[in-house]
Image (spheres, rainbow, N blue to C red):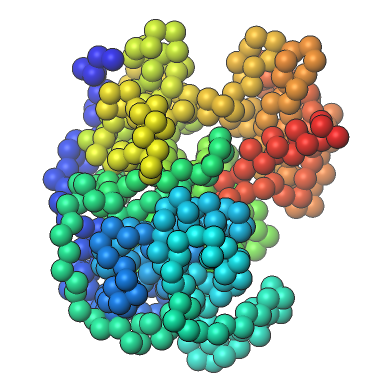
Amino acid sequence: MDTVMKKPWFEHYPEEIPKTIDYDEDTLQSYLKKAAKNYPDKSAFHFMGKEMNYKEVYESALKLANQLQLLGVTQGDRVAIMLANTPQAVISYYGALFAGGIVVQTNPLYVEREIEHQMNDAGAKVMICLDLVYPRVANVKEKTKLEHIIVTGIKDYLPFPKNLLYPFIQKKNTGIKVDLKYGPHLHSFRDVIQKGEAKEIPLDIDPKVDLALLQYTGGTTGPAKGVMLTHYNLVVNTQQCEKWMHKMKPGEEVIIAALPFFHVYGMTTVMNLAIRLGFKMIIMPKFDPQGILKAIQKHKATLYPGAPTMYIGLLNHPDIKKYDLSSIKACISGSAALPLEVQTQFEQATKGRLVEGYGLTETSPVAVANLIWGDRKPGSVGLPWPDTEVTILSAETGEQAKPNEVGEIIIKGPQVMKGYWNRPEDTQASFRDDWFLSGDMGYMDEEGYFYVVDRKKDMIIAGGFNIYPREIEEVLYEYEDVQEVCVIGVPDPYRGETVKAFIVPKEGKTISEADLDEYSRKHLASFKVPKFYEFREELPKTMVGKILRRVLVEQEKERNIK
């Protein structure tokens, strides 16, 4: 494909955002070392009443790193981290990197089958996990290459007397009490840190070659694949994020850390960005709308990266008007389409800016975003970031598409992954020359703004028409009593497929199929109007808040089989 291309998006860049950046050619963990030097006494995070400054976090990470080496971790070994957002998650991430390890982020919601697959695929030597998930890990340990498990609990980093009370609250809420018998292969996180020595370990790392992270994709089309991200990939995307958010002041901002750190979106735009710039993180172990509202008001939070469902959750909280949210300056929404209605309402509630971005695990993750302070277009995911090339691959010609022509979004830039772990054929199939094939359908307008139409595999083909669920969802989100919506294709004997919409009404509201049908027919072409509606109290979601369309598809298939 001809790689000579126009880049009309540069015309919209404000002068504060450079077209190209002089990136640090250093390891990712160097960010924490520099933060400890520049902001030693500044609070790195607040967690349920507990605070630690940057010097303390840095020293804790070094102590963990030295203990990991004593457990046999050498440069290039994989260290799995199965933690919710906690101080331990930050310390473990950077501690593993200081030891020369490659981090393998593992979702705490994974069941035994998923844990076993990921540990075997990655070949992880050590796992750091929460006590609540330890039984699942222990049940599969012998089927993997795991040699050591380090266990921690929420209580370990709570202030007195919360640390004493929390185990009772945890048992009451979860019904789980874990009895741990520490030994040669099972270790207490707290003891490991206490025994460790806060000294640096000499490493020979090439940031552009050596991996910092194996980040597993969701496995929507088969077993989850490990995305190989180098130190440089992650350093680059963090610096790109910094330049895009050019009004943010190092050492001064307060960021809500509700996006899971084990997801690359929360890892880059919250944890790594905060540590690079000396921000204070308000760490939230789970998404709690009222807790976040309280935290924004109490800590005068200025940044809140999130997902659309997170903003929807806040907007629909009955007490939102009781809280002062005016400290919020900027929010970047990702992981799913941001409905225009949600963006408008959130900006009215906070007086801050909320913009949509786009990216993938394979791009560390951000490739495109709307300008926070500048021109933006409704429905667009925005402009490519500095040093990032994005174009549309025409399905008809296999070459660069014309403006406004729908095709596959392809991406080239220094944040694009090295490839898939131990999957050379999948890696080769995902690239065309140096361009990463996203699998997402979209188009670029004449001014260089990009629009995501939908995932290739989510497209519904009904009676020969291509129907994109996102377009229908946008329309249904504008219906005043709809809180959440997800659209899928279901089998149809005449059309091949037809449209079904899953709807979550706002609390206290009742919606009829007839009302939605009448509304949809006013705003959609007849072939796009849902034939079926199903009303639910909630929709299946990832920990990031992304609605799991594939789960709804699978549930629908099971119904049809029965």
- Above/below status of 50 relative to 524: below
Of residues 432 and 468, the one nearer the viewer is 432
Q: Is residue 122 visible?
A: yes
| In the displayed structure image, the side of residue 151 where residue 436 appears, left or right | left
Q: State which quarter of the image contains the N terminus.
A: top left
Q: Residue at x 48, y 56 (%)?
A: 119
Q: Residue at x 50, y 84 (%)?
A: 182
Q: Residue 506's spot in the image, x, y percent?
A: 73, 48
Q: Residue 38's spot in the image, x, y percent?
A: 18, 71
Q: Which residue is drawn at 53% across and 87% down?
A: 163
Q: Residue 254's spot in the image, x, y percent?
A: 37, 65
Q: Residue 185's spot in the image, x, y percent?
A: 45, 77
Q: Is residue 350 visible?
A: no
Label count reads 0
Residue 374, by quadrant, is top left
Q: Which residue is drawn at 71% across and 79% down?
A: 172
| In the displayed structure image, the side of residue 369 where residue 121 appears, left or right | right
| In the displayed structure image, the side of residue 252 where residue 113 appears, left or right | right
Of residues 488 and 138, the one nearer the viewer is 138
Residue 409, by quadrant, is top left
Q: State which quarter of the image contains the C terminus.
A: top right
- Above/below status of 371 relative to 132: above
- Above/below status of 300 relative to 425: below
Of residues 164 and 109, the one nearer the viewer is 109
Q: Which residue occupies the extreme front position in the image?
A: 142
| In the displayed structure image, the side of residue 198 where residue 110 appears, left or right | right
